[in-house]
Image (tube, grey):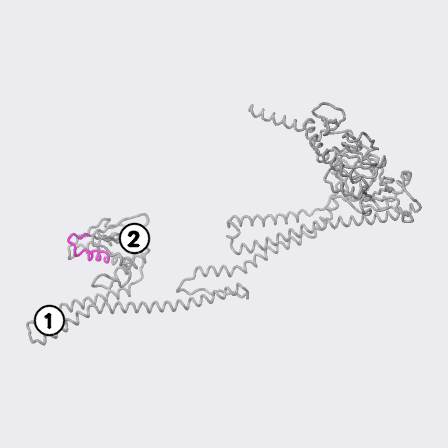
Amino acid sequence: MKKLHIYIFFLCALAVSCSSPEYDAKLINKTLHIQEHKAMSLTEELAKKLQGESFDSIWDLTQNSASQCLFYIFDNRRLVYWSDNWLAGDEVLLRSYDKWYYQRFTNAHAVCRWTRAGNYNILTVIPVKYAYPFVNRQLSNDFIEPFSAHKTTGITITKTDQKSAVYSSEGTYLFSLTESTGTEEVERDHSGLADSFSYRALLSSDNDNQSNTRKMPRVRVYFILEATLYGIIILLGLIGLIRARGFRRMKIRTKIYYLINTLVLFVSIYVFAVSVLHMRSRYQTQQRQILVNKTKYIQKALQESYFWNIGLSERNEAGMNIDLRDLSFTYETDILVYDLRGDLVGSSTPALFDKGIVSRHIAPEPIFSKNSTMTQYEQIGDMHYLAAYTEFYNGNYVQIGYIAVPMFIYDEEVNEEVDRFLAKLLPPNLIVLLLSFIISFFIVRSITQPLSALKDNMQNLRLGQTGKLLHYTGDDEVGELVARYNDMVKELEHSSELLAKSEREGAWRTMARQIAHEINNPLTPMKLTIQQLQRTKKLNDKERFDEYFDKSTALLIEQIDNLSRIAQSFSQFAKMPEVKPARVDIAARLFSVITLFRNNAAHIPIRYIGAESGVYAMADEEQIGQVFNNLIKNALQAIESKADGDIIVMLKQRDNDIEVSVSDNGCGIAEDIQDKIFRPNFTTKSTGAGLGLAISKNIVEGAGGNISFTTSSSGTTFYVRMLKG
């Protein structure tokens, strides 16, 4: 806690030090020296141009300069040029040349310097701080850019201490900074400006400004609705991009919808912004034109009033002020009149100049630039206003002065005009925006729905199945795609029929060759036996014939039985019923088959490891026994010639299935025929059709299981895995 207090104290001390006059003096000293260097460079250029050149080049130099300083050029004691007219003050006395000094003008504190340029004297002014006679929202006595200091910092010419003093770059003392209360002594009487038309905003205090602000109609409801709609669309777009992990991964329907609505959104925002800017510009253009027209009327009226005058001077000021006052009420605007040298000789609001708010000199543009008839924006404090300038002619159209007509355009008036326009623009714009979102949704849906159906149908399309045709009435690219898909489905269906027919014919040809091969094998020995029997009979040796007859008949019966078994195997493979999985006690079925095979003719032992009942699996109750018969029979045949033959049958219950394994210790299965074991009609035996393992595979897989084997030179193991019941 103690460290926290120290930290807070340190921050407070730092804040106080940063707002103290000593700290402000350091900043102002640094900035002032930079400004002095820029001002001196510009002053040297001015002095060079004054040697035989016109004021046009001087005008271009001062107006194009980025410096904040002001320039006044005197021919002896007569002012002949000024770069700006906002600085107001009494007559400026000529002091020593080439030395910076402090000067208090009526409306500003400044640092000045006189420079000799031939017959001319140049006064360079660096404004530091405003010093208006009264302050309000429009007029504030702040430091002028690029100078910056705390609002409570004031300026005094009395040297208080070394730390708060401000010096020139040459080391000359200028002024000091002091800590003020923030409420300087300012004039409170504004009665002289009470009837002003253009400068009325300068009279009101902050409270008056708040109470007198015009209550303008707002279209906040429409604006909030439209802004909310914009925000929702942008938010949904961002969510869609995040969920799809990028625009490229979005569905085509979403892409088209977002692209259409994004385009509509940007067009709507663009039209809205351009419309508002156009209305503001149009209103300001109208006000500018109104001001120009007023200026022409005032010019004509003054020409008639001063028809015989050949010049203007300060002697005309009293009477002219009265005339200008009358005209100002007629045209509802303030009027200023300057002589040919640019000095004020009449005003409808003389108090504005008497109080030193602005200079009594005309703006430099009309008198020093090439265009004396013009309109431009000017500024007093924070108040911007429009001013029109034109020539003051007498009856002979000889110019005797200049006329200036200022007009303050209230921001409230501009906003009111814009609000009226928005009240008409926003409702239809909002309706069009909503309709575009709804209509685009149905348009995108109508375009992409056939594509979605096309995708679904292609995913479900299977060889040998009839594909679903799509119906699309549009005659466009999507329609062409749907038509090509329908043609493909028809061609695929036709190809499937041809393929099925070819497969059936191939199967019958393969089956016919296999049957012919299997039948032809026993027919050859049968034919040879009968031929030998015929030759024996011709020998007329009854005893030998009878002996050979007995042997031949036994051989023929054996071959006929073999043919019968072949026919029975093919018949069984062709008529094998569909597998119907059910919950079967697989242990009881397996144990009953093993019991039958234990009494085999070769006396080969069959060992069983597993439960004798109570183990349930999903299998065909009628056909599963045939699988076990085939596996055990194949194992017996693989080791029938071995004296130490052994068969092991195991039943295991695993997490998700039941496993039955049949192992023998025969010589294994040759590598070149391992991939043909489950192929129909393949056999390595001299008898049989080679359908046992093919039938067993169909029975097991039809119930959701699988059959496999492992083999080596020391034996073979077949595995049957079935789902738990």
Check disc 1 and give the amino acid type: Phe
Element marked by disc 1: helix
Element marked by disc 2: strand
Please check the rendered image and state whether residue 266 is part of the magenta-colored stretch, yes or no: no
The image position of residue 538, as x and y in percent, is 9, 76
Residue density around tag 2, few if under 14, some if 14–19, many if 20 or more, within 10 Å: many
What residue range appears in magenta? 629-646
Residue density around tag 1, few if under 14, some if 14–19, many if 20 or more, within 10 Å: many
Q: Nearer the viewer, mark 2 or mark 1?
A: 1
Q: Which residue is at the front of the view, 14 or 624? A: 14
- In this rendering, position of residue 108 left or right of residue 507: right
Residue 622 visible in image: no
The image position of residue 334, as x and y in percent, is 83, 42
The quarter holding residue 207 reads: top right
Residue 549 visible in image: yes
The image position of residue 482, as x and y in percent, is 50, 64
Quarter of the picture containing the N terminus is top right
Check disc 2 and give the amino acid type: Arg
The image position of residue 300, as x and y in percent, is 88, 49
- In this rendering, position of residue 612 left or right of residue 542: right
Total numbered badges shown on the rendered structure: 2
Which residue is tagged 1?
549
Q: CA distance from mark 2 to mark 1?
A: 52 Å
Q: Which mark is residue 721?
A: 2
Q: Which mark is residue 656?
A: none
Q: Which residue is at the front of the view, 574 or 87? A: 87
Please check the rendered image and state whether residue 633 is part of the magenta-colored stretch, yes or no: yes
Q: Residue at x 26, y 62 (%)?
A: 682
Q: Which residue is at the front of the view, 269 or 452? A: 269
614 over 138 or under it: above or below: below
- In this rendering, position of residue 223 left or right of residue 541: right
